[in-house]
Amino acid sequence: MSVYGKDCPEHLQLALRSVYDDQTVKPDEIVVVFDGPLTGELYSVLDAFRSGKESFVFYCPLEENVGLGEALRIGTGYCTGDWIFRMDADDISDARRFERQIAYIREHPECDVVGTDIAEFQISADEPYIRRRVCPADHAGILKMAKHRTPVNHVSAAIKKEALLRCGGYISLPLLEDYYLWLRMLSQGCVFSNIHESLVHVRIGNGFLQKRRRSARIKGWKTLQRFMLDHKMISRPAAWANMVYVFLFTTMPSGLKKWAYKRALRK
């Protein structure tokens, strides 16, 4: 998990509780990267959470904000297990998330990445979920989806550490670090799968749509198209179609974007 200064203390507290206190299968270790200086309230939440868990909760404070991709690259170096489970500081893992993903990994040892569906809500976890993001379960479907959209919900991902490092680990690409990682791993033959259960609940009433309007996303998508072209994952017309799609989507009004999410991009 990466935490930065603008994260909400209350949301962080719920996220931390969801990956340990509420889990039916506890993690062996928890690594949290402080992406630059934090607020006093965030430090208080983190100190309280680590109290009594010092032997397996590790904090990695960075002097300055370096962005999610670099923070996760650094945090990976602190992880000692064979598998790394991703989590965000403002989302909530289902109580059976680790139990279900670990069971799947044991049954499918060929997998290098195992994701799950996610359920999205606005602000409060007590609110009804408004939609789900469902990705293909099988590797072939994931490979097909990867040509146009990210095929694994990053916050839900369990990643085999050996495969992650072999493929270069996290590389900074603002707003698209996860998609870039999946493409690099797929291009090197890693095996992917998704569980069709919403095992992470994602808060979207915190600037989620605004992030999808940034020009950095268009620049990042150019990098992804070049990568896929270089590795013969897509054709040049498909790359142009992807760029047209992302330009139209990132520049459309928020109201129209909400409609698109509801009608085409979510279930």
Image (cartoon, grey):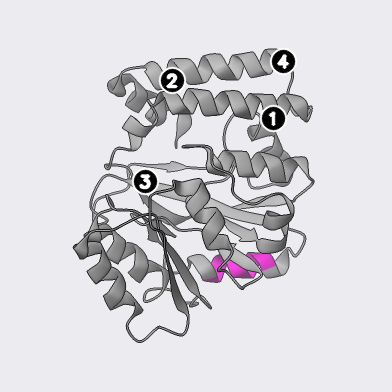
The residue where tag 3 is placed is 120
Relative depth, front residue between 113 and 140 = 113
Q: How far across and how far down the image is residue 28, in percent? A: 53, 78
- Res. 224 image quadrant: top right
Of the two numbered discs 2 and 1 in the rendering, the one whose residue sits closer to the viewer: 1
Type of the residue with mark 1: Phe
**Segment colored magenta:** 99-105
* Residue count near mark 4 (Cα–Cα under 10 Å), binned few <14, some 14–19, many ≥20: some
Q: Is residue 193 above or below residue 13?
A: above
Can residue 177 be seen in the rendering of this structure?
yes
Residue 227 got which mark? 1
Instruction: State if disc 3 and disc 4 touch (CB < 8 Å).
Output: no
Residue 211 located left or right of residue 162: left
Asked if residue 104 lies in the magenta stretch, the reply is yes
Mark nearer the N terminus (2 vs 1):
1
Mark nearer the N terminus (1 vs 3):
3
Q: How far across and how far down the image is residue 162, in percent? A: 72, 62
* Residue count near mark 1 (Cα–Cα under 10 Å), binned few <14, some 14–19, many ≥20: some
Say which element carries label 2.
helix
Type of the residue with mark 3: Glu
